Image: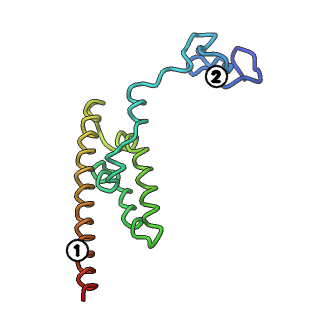
Amino acid sequence: MERGGVRSMYNIGNCPKCGYIINDSDRVCPYCGENLYPEPTELEQELEKFNWGAFLCALIWGLGHNCWWCLLLIPISLIPYVGIVFTIIFSFFMGNYGNKIAWKYKKWESLEEFRKTQRQWVIISLLITSFLIIIHMFYLGVFVFILQGLLSH
Ligand SMILES: [Zn+2]
């Protein structure tokens, strides 16, 4: 049983407020005036943004946000040959959904606190990533040094 209005081929549903049948050309409900396409709220906009902290350091960031299934990244990254590909996919997933995950898994005082904490995580993640890059450059340097030594004999 439908309340009010006439069903048409453009019917896209019912008004969330009064239940009146809405056509897809309606911006507001013709019955009660409810805005059918409200602007996304500040929170919704924030949660859509890419989370660089979660992208760069998915595992540590995840554990810091009570997101225990991020531990899956350990076995995933250890899979021979394809592990690195899955790790990159996982990182992009975390970057994309990081804000939504953080908002859901942790309690926040305010949107301001949320933003501030996520900004700090970007710095932490950048430091960890830089440190790992430097360590691996060092390993590469040692490897090249040893190789040169071997080749010169
Ligand atoms: Zn309505």
Q: Is residue 91 above or below residue 41?
A: below
Residue drawn at x 30%, y 54% as measured from the top left:
63
SS at mark 2 in the image:
strand
Instruction: Please name whichever residue, 6 or 142, is drawn nearer the observer in this view of the structure.
Output: 142
The image position of residue 20, as x and y in percent, is 65, 17
Residue reaching furthest bottom? 153
**Crowd class of label 1 (few under 14; some 14 to 19; many from 20; radius 10 Å):** few
Q: Residue at x 24, y 89 (%)?
A: 153
| Identity, as a three-letter code, of the amino acid under mark 2 | Asn
Q: Judge left or right: residue 128 versus residue 77.
A: left
Against 26, residue 49 (above or below) is below
Q: Which residue is mark 2?
A: 14
Q: Which mark is residue 142?
A: 1
The residue located at (27%, 70%) in the rendering is 140
Determine the image quadrant of residue 79.
bottom left
Q: Nearer the viewer, residue 47 or 137?
A: 137
Give percent across and percent down for residue 83.
Answer: 44, 66
Q: Quadrant of residue 139?
A: bottom left
Residue 34's quadrant in the figure?
Answer: top right
Residue type at numbered disc 1? Val
Q: Is the Cβ of the residue at disc 1 closer than 8 Å to that at disc 2?
A: no
Give whichever of discs 1 and 2 has the lower sequence position. Answer: 2
Q: Quadrant of the N terminus?
A: top right
Residue 144 is situated, as x and y percent measured from the top left of the image, at 27, 75
Residue at the front extreme of this rendering: 152
